[in-house]
Image: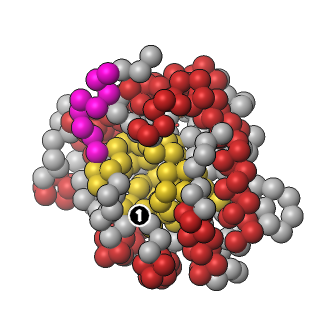
C-alpha cells in the first residue's frame, strides 16, 4: 500500500545545478536485494522507503548475488507495486565492473556501456533509467569514449541523466568538460564518503561543485561500521560476519574511534548512525547519502538523521579530533 503522506517531510536536495531533486537519503541495492536474499524483505524495504519519501533507488549491473539479480528483484517489485508511480521514481544503474565473460564484459568501452545498459533495462523491465552511470574510470579507454557512450544513451532515450562514479577530481573535471560541450545532462558523481573515508575532501567535492554536479555519497555508514552494531561483537546476521566486503580486522582498526563517536552521539541524544549521516549531509556539496539496509528499521534510523540539529564548529572540531586520534578523555 502506498502512503498518501509520503511527501509530507519534503526531504529533497537539488542535485548540483541541475533541475533534478533527490532525497537526502537514497537507498542502494548492492546488498540484500539479490535472488539469494529474502524477496519479501526486499519488497518491504523498497515500499517502506518509498512511503517515507525516498524516491531514489540505486542499482548496478552486477548487484546481487548472483550478479544481475538485484535488478531482477527491483523489476519484480516495480511491476507488482510501482508501475503507476514511475514518474515519481529516480532509478539508477551502472556499467563498468565485471559482468559477463570476454573482453566486453567490464570497464569503459562503448561496447560494454551500451550493451550493459540494454541488459540492465531488460532485467529491470524499465523503458529507461533516470540516471545511468559509468561505474569506474577505465585506465585503458579514453574518457571521451566512455562519455560519448553515456551521451548516446541519453540520445537513445535510455537514460534521462548520466553520472560517473569513482573518478578522481581531474578525471571528473575532464569528463564534465566534454559533457558540457556535448550538452549531455551530466548531473551527478557517485563516490565513497563518510566519517571514516574523507578523501573526497582533498579535491573531488570542490571539483563537483565547480562543475555544477551533485555528489551522492555511497557507503556513508562505512558498510555498517558507523552504527552501534559492532561496538561489542560481530552479530551473526551482519555484513561483517560474512568476511567478504567488510572484515573483522576493519572493525578492530577503528573500534576505539567508534566508541568515542558513539558516546558523542549519545550525549546529544541520537545514535551513531544519525551522527554519521548528518555529518556527511552537513556539506552542502553533498546531494544525498546513499545508504544500504538489511531491515526496515535501518531505513527509519537513516531518515531520523535528518532531524539531527546542525553540528556547530566546536562539535565538528571535536569529531575531527576523535578521527585523528587527538581526542583524549
Ligand atoms: P552503508 O555504509 O549505508 O552500509 C549499509 C549497511 O550498514 C547495511 O546493509 C547494514 O548492514 C548496516 N546498517 C545500516 N543501517 C544500520 C543501522 N541503523 N544499524 C545497524 N546497522 C546498519 O552503505 P553500503 O555500503 O551498503 O552502500 C550503499 C549503496 O551505495 C549500495 O547499495 C550501492 O547502491 C552504492 N555503492 C556504490 C559503489 C560504487 O562503486 N559506486 C560501491 C559501494 C556501494 P547489515 O547487513 O550488517 O545489517
On the question of residue 239 being in view, the answer is: yes
User: Magenta region, mostly helix, strand or loop?
Assistant: loop
Q: Secondary structure at mark 1?
A: strand
x then y, percent, for residue 295: 50, 26
The relative height of residue 2 versus residue 158 in the rendered view (above or below) is above
On the rendered structure, is 181 left or right of 119?
left
On the rendered structure, is 157 left or right of 206?
right
Estimate how packed mark 1 is, as few (under 14), some (14 to 19) or many (20 or more) residues with alpha carbons within 10 Å: many
Check disc 1 and report the residue beneath it: 187
In depth, the one of 116 and 302 nearer the eye is 116
On the rendered structure, is 120 left or right of 47?
right
In the current view of this chain or complex, which residue is farthest to the top? 1
Q: Residue at 28% of width from left, 45% of height from top? A: 12
In depth, the one of 275 and 62 nearer the eye is 62
Q: Is residue 167 magenta?
A: no
Write down the quadrant of residue 206 in the picture. Answer: bottom left
On the rendered structure, is 245 left or right of 49?
right
In the current view of this chain or complex, which residue is farthest to the right? 102
Q: Quadrant of the N terminus?
A: top left
Report the magenta residues as a range: 4-12
The relative height of residue 152 versus residue 229 in the rendered view (above or below) is below
On the question of residue 201 being in view, the answer is: no
Q: Residue at 49% of width from left, 51% of height from top? A: 130
Amino acid at each position: 500500500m502506498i502512503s498518501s503522506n509520503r511527501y509530507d517531510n519534503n526531504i529533497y536536495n537539488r542535485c548540483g545545478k541541475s533541475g533534478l531533486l533527490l532525497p537526502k537519503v537514497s537507498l542502494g541495492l548492492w546488498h540484500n536485494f539479490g535472488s539469494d536474499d529474502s524477496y519479501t524483505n526486499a519488497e518491504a524495504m523498497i515500499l517502506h522507503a518509498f512511503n517515507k519519501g525516498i524516491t531514489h533507488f540505486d542499482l548496478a549491473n552486477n548487484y546481487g548475488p548472483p550478479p544481475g539479480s538485484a535488478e531482477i528483484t527491483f523489476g519484480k517489485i516495480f511491476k507488482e507495486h510501482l508501475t503507476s508511480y514511475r514518474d515519481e521514481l529516480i532509478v539508477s544503474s551502472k556499467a563498468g565492473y565485471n559482468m559477463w565473460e570476454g573482453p566486453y564484459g567490464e570497464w569503459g568501452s562503448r561496447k560494454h556501456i551500451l550493451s550493459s545498459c540494454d541488459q540492465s533495462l531488460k532485467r529491470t523491465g524499465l523503458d529507461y533509467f533516470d540516471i545511468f552511470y559509468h561505474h569506474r574510470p577505465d585506465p585503458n579507454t579514453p574518457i571521451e569514449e566512455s562519455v560519448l557512450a553515456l551521451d548516446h544513451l541519453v540520445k537513445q532515450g535510455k537514460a534521462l541523466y548520466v553520472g560517473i562514479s569513482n573518478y578522481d577530481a581531474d578525471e571528473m573535471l575532464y569528463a564534465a568538460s566534454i559533457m558540457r560541450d556535448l550538452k549531455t545532462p551530466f548531473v551527478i558523481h557517485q563516490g565513497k564518503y563518510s566519517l571514516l573515508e574523507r578523501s573526497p575532501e582533498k579535491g573531488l567535492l570542490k571539483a563537483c561543485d565547480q562543475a555544477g554536479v551533485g555528489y551522492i555519497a555511497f557507503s556513508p555508514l562505512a558498510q555498517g561500521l558507523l552504527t552501534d552494531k559492532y561496538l561489542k561483537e560481530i552479530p551473526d546476521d551482519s555484513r561483517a560476519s560474512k568476511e567478504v566486503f567488510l572484515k573483522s580486522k576493519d572493525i578492530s582498526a577503528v573500534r576505539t574511534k567508534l566508541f568515542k563517536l558513539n558516546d558523542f552521539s549519545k550525549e546529544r541524544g541520537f545514535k551513531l548512525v544519525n551522527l554519521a549521516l548528518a555529518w556527511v549531509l552537513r556539506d552542502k556539496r553533498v546531494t544525498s547519502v546513499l545508504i544500504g539496509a538489511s531491515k526496515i528499521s535501518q531505513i527509519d534510523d537513516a531518515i531520523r538523521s535528518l532531524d539531527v540539529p546542525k553540528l556547530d564548529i566546536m562539535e565538528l572540531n571535536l569529531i575531527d579530533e576523535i578521527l585523528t586520534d587527538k581526542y583524549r578523555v
